[in-house]
Image (tube, rainbow, N blue to C red):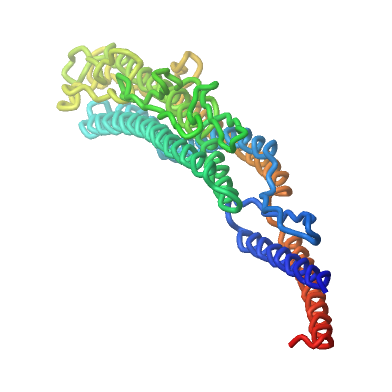
Amino acid sequence: MAGLFGTLSMTARALDAQRAGLTVTGQNIANLNTEGYSRRALLLAESLIGGVEVAGIRARRDLLLEARVRQEIPAEAREAALADSLSVVEAALGRPGESIDARLSAFFDSFSELASDPASTVARDGVLQQGRLLAGSFNDMAGRLESARREADVQVRTGVSEINTLAGRVARLNVAIGGAVGGDAEALRDERELALEQLAGLADVSVLHREDGTVDVSIAGGRALVIGASSYEVEVTSTPPAGMAAISIGGVDITTALARGRVAGALDARDTRIPAYQARLDELAYEVARSVNTVHQTGFDLNGAAGQAFFTPLGGVAGAAAALQLDPAIGADPSLVAASGTGAPGDNQVARALADLRGTRTVGGTATFSEGWGQLVYRVGSDSQVAQAEQRSRHEVVAQVARLRDQVSGVSLDEESANMLKFQRAYEANARFFTTVNSVLDTLMSIGGVA
């Protein structure tokens, strides 16, 4: 009789174990599409008093594959951020034939028209109008590039803010994990791993797992970002002359040490790519002003006086695109436009020479003005396409490593369905066994006269 009661107790524990298996399987299926969720597995062990008992619930994780995912994410994020910034620049340059190239063509066309009738007031007004439009086009493009650079700086500042937020979350989760048990601890670990992946997307970080379940996180070559329950803030300082953000931690500037991640991509766009485009635009604007002024000053205006600078003389190449403007005196008096090379009425030598500048290779000594603009457009487009291609390549690497990780920790609907069937069948078998033993006990107690 005592043995049958023990069998009932053993079967009851078995029913609890199979019920727990069904619960775990149901939780896995419920979280099939939950980002960052790691598949749970029921751990069963032989009971010392017979039968089976639940030894615990463990999340299926592979720390090595999780680390590999975090190692690959920053490179993809850097190229994605760079591609986004360059796409803004590419759009700012405008369509071929509708941007500065069109203004250059119209500007030199106006001198061709003036050469056909040097005394024409209408033609002179046309020259001034096209000069203003060309200068304005350079001014506007310089402003667009500067706006793109400042947008990249905003991305840097936003990224640093997100780094600090995620670092604080990881530190808080470290504390919570230390005081949690069972399923609660596993859910917190899932949340922390998701935060670490998001952090890796912002900057190249290193993660060290400790025996107590906490993690330490370092950034920029080993500088502490999270140590146990403490997080250390990454600081942003505006630097002269443009007020761009410099990044530091613990008083050490790490701006140039950030090589991968979204922040690094924004830094590359802000500090390297866009300034290079601005320098090319400034060189083009400077050469336009210098070449036109040089030729214009060799001629004579409608009054027979020596020609003056057509564009306001520029102090240097840097900032030339933003500073380019029509000389105020010429802008107010079309008669000051120099078309003659001798001062004689009807002479158009200078007007022809100015029109011929369109085909002169003055930009770097190797390119015409239109070719110089085309080289800038090509450079931006090429950089953008390279960044996009690199981002796609890096994304595929991340996806492949993530698939390997998900084979361990991801939820498979087919596998969970099989587990559900397995636990269900086991539960039914134990239930039938329990019913049989209970029936035997009832029969024996009835025979023995036990009410």
- The spot of residue 105 in percent (x, y) is 40, 32
* Residue furthest front in the image: 449
Q: Residue at x 41, y 24 (%)?
A: 247
- Say which residue appears at 67% left-offset and 53% top-offset: 57
For the C terminus, give its image quadrant. bottom right
**In the picture, which quadrant includes the N terminus?**
bottom right
Q: Is residue 390 visible?
A: no
Q: Is residue 165 visible?
A: yes
Query: In the shown orientation, is residue 240 left or right of residue 37?
Result: left
Q: Residue at x 41, y 22 (%)?
A: 248
Work out whether residue 304 or residue 205 is closer to the camera in this orientation and state it: 205
Residue 153: percent from the left, percent from the top?
38, 31
Q: In terms of depth relative to the viewer, which is nearer, 197 or 142?
A: 197
- Of the pair 353 and 264, the residue shown nearer to us: 264
Left or right, 281 with reference to 377: left
Residue 417 lies, with reference to residue 271, above or below; the image says below
Q: Is residue 299 above or below residue 409?
A: above
